[in-house]
Amino acid sequence: MKQKADVLQGTLALMVLKTLAVLGPLHGYGIARRIEQISGDLLAVNQGTLYPVLLRLEQEGAIASEWGASENNRRARFYRLTRLGRKQLQAETQDWEQTAAIIARFFDAKAEDLS
Amino acid sequence: MKSLKRFFRRVVNVATRRTQEERLREEIGEHIALQTEENLRAGLSPVEARRQAMLKFGGVEAMKQDYRAERGLVFIENLLGDLRNAGRTISRMPGLAAVIIVSLAIGIGVNTTILSWIQLILLKPVPGVSGASNFLLVEPRSESGGYAGASWLEYRDLQTRVPALRDIVASQMVPFNVGETGQTERTHGQLVSGNYFSALGLQPALGRFIRLEEAERPGTEPVVVISYDYWQTRFRGSPGVVGQKLRVNERDLTVIGVAPKEFQGTMVPLKFELWAPATMAPALLGGTRDLEDRSVRSFSLIGMLKPGATREEAQAELSTTMAQLARDYPEASAGIGGEILPFWDSPRGPQRMLISGLAVLEGVMLLLLLAVCGNTANLMLARGSSRQREVAVRVALGAGRWRIVSLVLSENMLLALLGASLGAALAVWGTTALRVAPMIGAFPIQFQTRIDEFTLAFAILLGVACGLIFSTAPALHLVKLDPQDGLRYGSNTPPRSRARQVLMGVEVGLAMAVLIAAALFLENFRAARQTDPRFRPEGVLLAAYDLSGRHPTEASEREFATRLLERLRSLPDVEAAAIATNVPLDLHGIPARPFTVEGRVRTEAGLDRAISNIATPGYFKVMAIPLLEGNDFADMRDKTAPAEAIVNEEFVRRYLNGSEALGRRIQTRAGSFVVIAVARDSVYDAFGEPPQPAVYFSYRDIPRDQGEIHLRARSGNETALTSEARAVLRGLDPMLPLYDVRTFSQHIDRNLYLRRVPARMFVVLGPLLLGLAAIGIYAVVSYAVARRTREIGVRLAFGATSGRVARQIIRENLGAIAWGTAIGWLLALEISVHAISKGVVNLSVFIGVPAILLGVAALACWIPARRASRIDPLAALRHE
């Protein structure tokens, strides 16, 4: 149970970083929307879970935030990627691709390949 | 690195919590507003749009929890919350909190004070000298078990013949008369070996110390080192003091240096002001044989191990050397071995008296602290059961076990630490009080106790330990609580808590043990004080004179004493007068001298020894020691009588096999003496000592330059004789001071001083402990009674008399108390039989203390019980 949540959080953090890297500074809602558009139902129910992740990333120094005006001219908190965040994204993307590749190979492997 | 950074952010966040909450709320609001707009654009109704947005966002509270967990340090936040809560709880029960804090403070304060004292003796036995705790005592020990001290020549031998010791230093305590003749002032100092200061690793505050070669041969440079305090008070800290002359015992000594500030000599707690080379002894002490006579054992030796050497090696080398010396000098050293002892474990002198009292005291005080903890645990437990509902609500709302435990813990820890801080403050006060140097008669004493980091840490540690101890019971109790039970309103009487009763019993038992120990200690002290010394100190005035500065001859010494006594005896109020060299019950004991008895064949090697005193005729009359056979010494002017000696009963028993004593001859180095009388045994060194053989020589035969004048007042008012005695001495020699004037009772008192300090502490702490026990019992019973108001109301309504109700409550509680008392009693008995009185049971203490304790306990039960039994049944039944 706990492990699953960790995986989700880990991936969520990566998605946040990627989103910010692609789209530039965004507020929380914008990030949620973007992740929803791409990932489908991952955030369809619990958009709120995004905020603890944002906080953690900010505490780690991967992203920074400041107040700005939203589309409808209200005060909103905008997050942007820091240099550290960019590096982290790079590293984690590599990690992720590597891991994904290995897992994929495992799934592709047939019984006869192992004998 | 990353986690560290996060940690700091979190710490900052804990501090800025409010603004952070604000920010999150705003962000959530914005998020939902944007989602709602989106939904509106998708064509939903405004209400539905908002509802969908909220749904999509998910559980706000759960998210906030996550967010908080992510943001701050949950542990610290909880702790701060708990502490705030604890602060509130404590401020709601000021009376109870005050009792707990004050009792803890006393317990911790007393323990810390005593620890600082013990620490001083164990870790810093020589103030101003680092590493003194590693010093060793080198103690010559006679076969009869006495520690006699070392002679100077023996010291010189040991210095080269115990290679495991890097340095051995010798010192001897001596009284000095400082100043010009006629206006001298009594000051205490030490005669020291040449390596004294360098081996101790001291640096002079000014000038230099005694050089090695200055204590090599007698008659070298007359120099003296003064203490820092002496420099400050007598020379106003003038830097020009070095090179000045100081008149000491009629000799001019040149001040060569000032000792460092804290240094007070190597016989703590005695405080010395002057240090002169040991080789000055003959010049300063009027021709003593200290430097050439191996049987004059006046020096104390301190040794330091060579790096890598062990105490066992040193001991082996010392034993070999002492055996060799015993063969080489049988007359002075036969039967004398040697012992290496840790510095704190001094077998004689002031340190010995202090350390034994302190050890008992610290043990008792730790028990006292334990009793305080028991008391507090009980109070907290009683309070804990009245807050079962609160805890049940917390549990029902989802508080975990650890949260409950930490709730209880933080509350108790707060109390404990408050108690510890107050205790530390008390200890600071206590150690300062100890530092104030009292004069024990002529002996200046100083304890350089202080509260340092170590003792402070000890106080806090005690506080934490106490907190943990008295948290355990309530925490366990509350954790086991079933919220359902707790929430059900107090319709049923709460299950009677066994824990509380047991704790109460334990506490009373501890109090019992401590009180008995205290009472025994006091009783022993009092008994010692009241033991018949077998002479009569009441009505006797003591005063000392010293001719050593006058370079007198034997004849002039005898003449002086004779004329002094004649004049004193002519005073109307003087019933009897005498002069003796030693006074019984002296802090430093009376010397024992070797001798041989004519016609006695010794079976063991070595010489017979007996306590020896030199006295004038009339001594036994002044002291009221009856002569069982024979008559007093011949008159001082008698030139024909042979040299005389008077022995005591024990001497006759031990050395004359109980046969006829009169006419027997005793041979000492001073000559041959004929026994002319047998005196009754009396006390010489300490109250309660076993009978010791003693021999008195006549002042006529062995005149001395120093003497203690003993005067018995006819009226019984000995202090009135002081001025007359002074006048007499002035009449004989206007320039000679009379010093150390005191009544015999004062003399005894000041020598008991070091034993009296712990005894006094017991006098204060006994009642305190009793008070604590009473408060504990009172609190427990009144809480228990308050919880049972309804039950009592029902019983009263059904016709029980209030007396019956009160009796029942008292009976229930006294049961537990009686158990505790019995166990504590047995414990104390065990300790007493094995450790204190060695098989003798002091009945008055073992019956009296429990009687008092049970009486106080019954009273502490009775007050709340009576209050409970007086309530109106109707009011009690309405009581929720």
Image (tube, grey):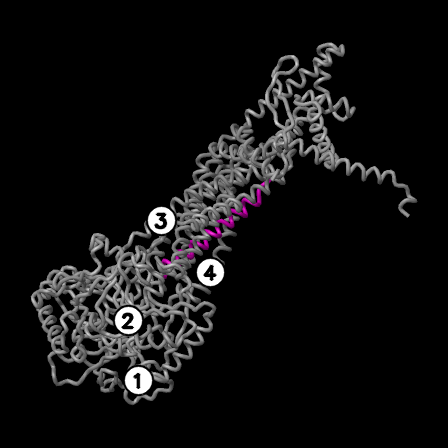
Local SS, label 1: loop
Residue marked by disc 3:
B430
Instruction: State the image quarter where residue A27 is shown.
Output: top right
Q: Amino acid at mark 4?
A: Leu
Q: Residues at badges 2 and 4 in contact (C-beta under 8 Å)?
A: no
Q: Nearer the viewer, residue B782 or B338?
A: B338
**Which is more N-terminal, label 2 or label 3?**
2
Sequence-earlier tag: 1 or 3: 3
Q: Which of the two marks, 2 or 4, is nearer to us in this view?
A: 2
Please report contact status of discs 2 and 1: CB closer than 8 Å, yes or no.
no
Circle 4 marks a residue in which chain?
A: B
Let me know if residue B820 appears in the view.
Answer: yes
Q: CA distance from mark 2 to mark 1?
A: 48 Å
Q: Which disc is residue B656 wearing? A: 1
Closer to the camera in the image, B71 or B686 = B71
Numbered circle sitting on residue B213? 2
| Magenta segment main secondary structure | helix
Residue type for callout 2? Glu
The residues bearing labels 4 and 1 have C-alpha atoms spaced at a distance of 42 Å
Looking at the image, which residue is at 24% across and 56% down?
B230
Three-letter residue code for mark 3: Gly
Verify whether residue B473 appears in magenta.
Answer: no
Q: Earlier in the sequence, mark 4 or mark 1?
A: 1
Badge 3 and badge 2 in a common chain:
yes
* Chain of the residue on which disc 1 is drawn: B
